[in-house]
Image (spheres, rainbow, N blue to C red):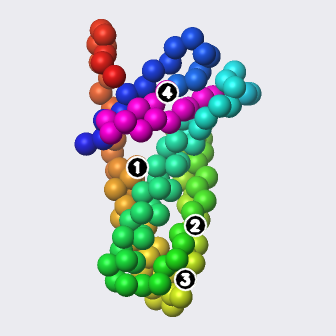
Amino acid sequence: MAKISSSLKNELYKIEIKSQSGNIVIADEPIDMGGMDRGFSPKELLASALAACSSATVKMYADRKNWDLQEVKINIELDFIAKENKTIVNRKVAFIGNLDESQKSRLLAVANTCPVHKMLSNPIEIITMLEDNLKH
């Protein structure tokens, strides 16, 4: 289970996000949304999670198979179409290394098995509750 805490104080839309292990990321809204663009936007963070998970999952698989995967490049485009209440994610993947077409095809299938891909492509339930004095 991932546990994340965030805090937004006096700097408009600048959000400090902390992981349970102590890592820190800054998120912010783009300038056209009133932010200062000092960090990833929330949508960019979501797309980043898919890119990171896909890359790591593919690399782990290739390493177990002793395949010559030297680099994984991923571009993610994430868009929400309000009229259709639909999210569209386009993921483009390139595998750099001495790999044949069969290996590349298998790695592409493996990308679809990453945990974040599974989370985003299945029903999601978000439970929100009010708490006083959350601890970070």
Instruction: Say which of marks 2 and 4 sits in front.
Output: 4
In primary-sequence order, the first of circles 3 and 2 is 2
Q: CA distance from mark 1 to mark 2?
A: 20 Å
Q: Quadrant of the N terminus?
A: top left
**In-front residue for pair 61/79:** 61
Identify which residue is drawn at 30% across, 9% down. Answer: 132
- Does residue 121 show up magenta in the picture? no
The residue that mark 3 highlights is: 97
Q: Is residue 118 visible?
A: no
Residue 52 in percent (x, y) is at 47, 56
Identify which residue is drawn at 31% across, 10% down. Answer: 133
What is the magenta range? Answer: 16-29
User: Disc number at residue 73?
Assistant: 2
Identify which residue is drawn at 40% across, 78% down. Answer: 62
Residue 90 in percent (x, y) is at 57, 58
The local crowd at label 3, few if under 14, some if 14 to 19, many if 20 or more residues have their Cα within 10 Å, is few
Q: CA distance from mark 2 to mark 4?
A: 27 Å
